[in-house]
Image: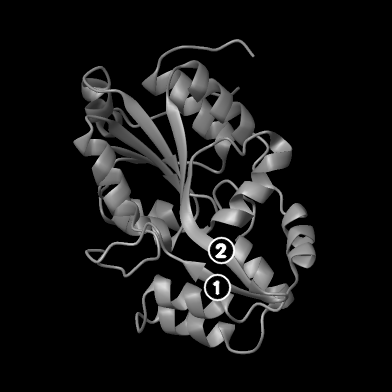
């Protein structure tokens, strides 16, 4: 596996603190673990008119992601069998399973932190033997033969982005429990939490955001690089697989 060259100045704070507290890894799902956004995929296939208008309102800052997601899910017209079939076609990063195995062997917990759909995440992960991972996401509930709604067990009234799942609150909880947090993410739902963790492995839009905000991060294209990073730079060990 190719080594990643790190900027020493960027990495120094991580080296200095790595032995003080145990690490925990929080991973976004859509576009980070999965190769496409699950909700967008379902809406493209099963969404009634109006879901794009909600998306635009969210992007313009007129509504929070919780209101956007709730409205969009109510516009999905699909049976459970149709939904399952669509979810089964969604692929994940090929290196994620090894990433989880390596972290687990090193005694590091990996948890999924998503503003997406809990049922979808677990369904997609199950064929890979990864459905044991803790998932903190919005709860998808079937309310009719072809109708669905969202519940928000991880929302917070303090969330500045009015998200369905307040990732910042979850990261703060682990900090309060004496952990250091490594976060892996890719997009807008990861912006806020990236400023509340110790280090970020950033994909896609999150790369430029972390650079603009001067956040400690490493640009990656996927979990092969993330795996290399935890082996070479945080835990300084190689695991036989």
Judging by the rendered image, the residue that carries numbered circle 1 is: 149
Q: Secondary structure at mark 2?
A: strand
Colour scheme employed for the rendering of this structure: one colour
In the rendered view, would you say 198 is above or below 79? Answer: above
Can see residue 1?
Answer: yes
Q: Residues within 10 Å of mark 1 (few under 14, many from 20)?
A: some
From this view, report whether residue 28 is shown above or below residue 115: above
User: At 24% across and 26% down in the image, what residue appears?
Assistant: 12
Distance of label 1 from label 2 (alpha carbons)? 6 Å
Q: Nearer the viewer, residue 86 or 150?
A: 150
Toward which corner of the image does residue 50 lie, by quadrant?
bottom right
Which label's residue is closer to the chain start, 1 or 2? 2
Q: Residue furthest front?
A: 144
Please give the residue where the numbered disc 2 appears in the rendered image.
Answer: 140
For label 2, the crowd category at 10 Å Cα-Cα, with few meaning under 14, some 14 to 19 and many 20 or more, is some
Q: Nearer the viewer, residue 90 or 123?
A: 123
Instruction: Name the residue: 27% across, 52% down.
Output: 169
Q: Which mark is residue 35?
A: none
Q: Position of residue 71 (x, y in %)?
A: 51, 80
**Looking at this view, is 196 or 119 the one in front?**
119
Residue 91 lies, in percent from the top left, at 71, 49
């Amino acid at each position: 596996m190719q080594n990643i060259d790190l900027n020493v100045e960027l990495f120094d704070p991580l080296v200095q603190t790595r032995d003080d507290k145990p690490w925990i890894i929080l991973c976004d799902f859509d576009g980070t673990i999965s190769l496409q956004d699950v909700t967008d995929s379902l809406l493209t296939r099963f969404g009634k008119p109006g879901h794009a208008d909600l998306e635009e309102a969210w992007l313009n800052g007129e509504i929070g992601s919780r209101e956007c997601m709730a409205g969009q899910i109510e516009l999905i017209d699909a049976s459970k069998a149709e939904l399952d079939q669509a979810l089964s076609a969604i692929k994940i990063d090929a290196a994620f399973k090894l990433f989880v195995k390596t972290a687990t062997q090193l005694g590091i917990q990996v948890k999924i932190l998503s503003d997406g759909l809990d049922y979808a995440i677990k369904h997609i992960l199950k064929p890979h033997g990864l459905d044991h991972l803790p998932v903190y996401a919005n709860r998808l509930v079937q309310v009719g033969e072809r109708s669905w709604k969202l519940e928000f067990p991880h929302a917070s009234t303090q969330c500045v982005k009015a998200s369905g799942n307040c990732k910042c609150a979850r990261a703060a909880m682990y900090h309060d429990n004496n952990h250091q947090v490594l976060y892996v993410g890719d997009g807008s739902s990861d912006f806020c939490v990236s400023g509340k963790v110790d280090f970020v492995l950033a994909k896609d839009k999150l790369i430029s955001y972390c650079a603009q905000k001067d956040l400690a991060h490493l640009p990656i294209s996927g979990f092969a690089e993330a795996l290399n990073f935890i082996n070479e730079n945080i835990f300084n060990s190689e695991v036989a697989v």
